[in-house]
Structures are given as structure tokens and as C-alpha cells.
Amino acid sequence: MAAEASSHTTEAMSVPNLKNQSSNLVLRNDLSLYPKPIDALVECMKQSVLGYALTCTPTVPATLLHRAHYTSNALFDSNNQVKSVFYEAFDAKGKTKKVQLTKENEMVVPSADQLVSMFNEMGYEPLLERISTFKKNQLPDLWRYFFSIFLRCLSGRTSSLDSASVTFQGLLYGIYYDVKVDFATILWTEFCSHINHSLKGTEIANARFWAIVVHAYYQQIGYVADPHLAEMRFTPIAIPILDDEPAAFCAQIPNVMLSKASPECIERTTKSKREKENGRWTKWSKERKEEKKGFGENFTEEKTTEETEDVDPCG
């Protein structure tokens, strides 16, 4: 996203304090916090092309982010595609300006049939026939968390978290198969879709991405904010508590994803794959499915913000 400052200055308008929606969460960097069955997946995602988008938490005064989001506006072309986004910010002299964000690349996403094939390869039960009927809860535990990380960390959605658009699912496809889909356009489309939302006057959607935008702009013009301003805080996605049986989880990660992980992670996961092939965890896996009613039951969450609102880690 490119930011261009307009030459038009305006009087600074009054901006209310906005609530940060429980969306656009951050993936924790410390792999030691994750149980062994999950840390391999998280490391693969951190090393992927989307690692920055999943983990970046720039230091931005909350008031500057509130102003940018509250004053933002998305403009659409004749095909109802977002052409540009404008928001209000201060220039180096403290006067307000309209800043423009643009994204011009053509969007390329996998087909619906390719997405169906991917989810079935992950172990979707029963076999998925049409992408329109996809539900996250039909995936195995590992890939449910994989889907949740994308939806909770890279989108502004706070409801209907059991599915996502075909366009957004292209992100999963690109990381799972390590293919070059247009990640930037997909994230841009998702970001813009929440700019003109109905709760804009009270809540911030995609707060972390707005922080990246605002931080980049002010850094570019050399603006120094009041050091006494409160910094924006971001909510991390919850970490699951799983039974200590890595073979049942790590063995599902495709080699093309593991190629980006550390040697220790690759060695451990390769061993788990052999254990899977030898059937060591088959009996355990069947018993576990009978005991568990849902993945969400085994989640715990640490509160790191002043908000007390519950965040569903499984999405």
C-alpha cells in the first residue's frame, strides 16, 4: 500500500475514542508458548510471506490511529472494486492532511475447485463437494487452528467466523501449497471491506493494519508524536491447549510448508510423520475424537489488554 499526502490542509476535527474490535489479532512470536503439536505450524506461518502481516505490532499513539480510522473513506470504481482509500493525518507541522492509499495490482485467486481439493487434502469430513458449504468445524484440529489464525489475525471480522470468502481462502491456499497467489491484493480487499462499516464511529476494524498504515506515514514525514500519548494495544490470538501427542498433528503438515521451518522442527515433524505411517497414534486419535466434542473446549487465553471482552480463540 502506497501512501500519498494531499496538498489540501483542513482544520483538525474532533475524533471520539474508539473501541478496538476483537479482530485483526496478532500471532505471538515466542514459539515456546505453543504446545509441541502447534509450534511447528506456527513457525511455518511466521517464516512464510505472510509472517509480517501476522505478527507486526507497530508502536502508534491510539489517538492518531483513531483519527485515521474515523476519517477514512473508500472510493470504488465502476466494477465496485476499491480504487483508493483516504484518511486524515497530521503533517510534519501539525496540520491535518488527507492521505491516500492505493493498490493497483490485478487480483489472482485459486478456483473454487482448487480450494475444495485443498480442504479435502487437509482431512475435511465428510468430503467437501462445494466450497459454498465449507465450515471450519469440519476440519481436523490442526487445520481448524490454521484457519482461525488467518481469519482472526488477517481480517476485521468479529462474527460468522466458521467460514470466509473464496477470495480470503486464497491466503490459506498460497501458504499451504507455497504458491504465489496475490497475497497483497487479497489483504487489501479484506482491509478495504471494513472501512465504511456501520460501527465506524465507535469501533476500529483492522486496528493492527491501521497501525501499520499510520506508523509508516508518520515515519515517512518525520512527525514526532507527544511521547505522553497512550500507545495502541493489540490482542494476541489465544493459544490452544492440546494433548501432548505431536504425531497426530505435526504429521499433517505438508513438506512444502515445513521447508521454511527450523532444522529441529523439520526433524521432529519428520519423526512424527514416520510414527503416523507406523500407526502408533491411530488408536489414540480415535479415542480422542470420541472424548472431545469440540476444539474450542481445549483453549485458554491470556489477557494482555485492558479490555475484558472475551475473544474466541477458535474463531
Image: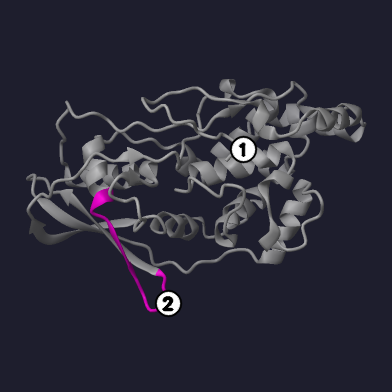
Three-letter amino acid code at disc 1?
Cys
Q: How is the image coloured?
A: one colour
Q: Which quarter of the figure has residue 195?
A: bottom left
Q: Is residue 190 above or below residue 161?
A: below
Residue drawn 74% across the image and 26% down it: 268
The disc at residue 44 is: 1
Ranked by sequence position, the earlier of labels 2 and 1 is 1
Task: Answer whether residue 72 is magenta in the image.
Answer: yes
Task: Answer whether residue 191 is magenta in the image.
Answer: no
Q: Residues within 10 Å of mark 1 (few under 14, many from 20)?
A: many
Q: Is residue 6 above or below residue 285?
A: below
| Label pair 2/1, CB-CB below 8 angstroms | no
For disc 2, the marked residue is 79
The percent coordinates of residue 183 (x first, y second) are 51, 55
Q: Is residue 105 above or below residue 236?
A: below
**Secondary element at image label 1:** helix
The percent coordinates of residue 137 (x first, y second) are 69, 44
Answer yes or no: is residue 219 visible. no
**Secondary element at image label 2:** loop
> How far, Cα to Cα, is label 2 from label 1?
36 Å
Which residue is nearer to you in this view: 249 or 294?
A: 294
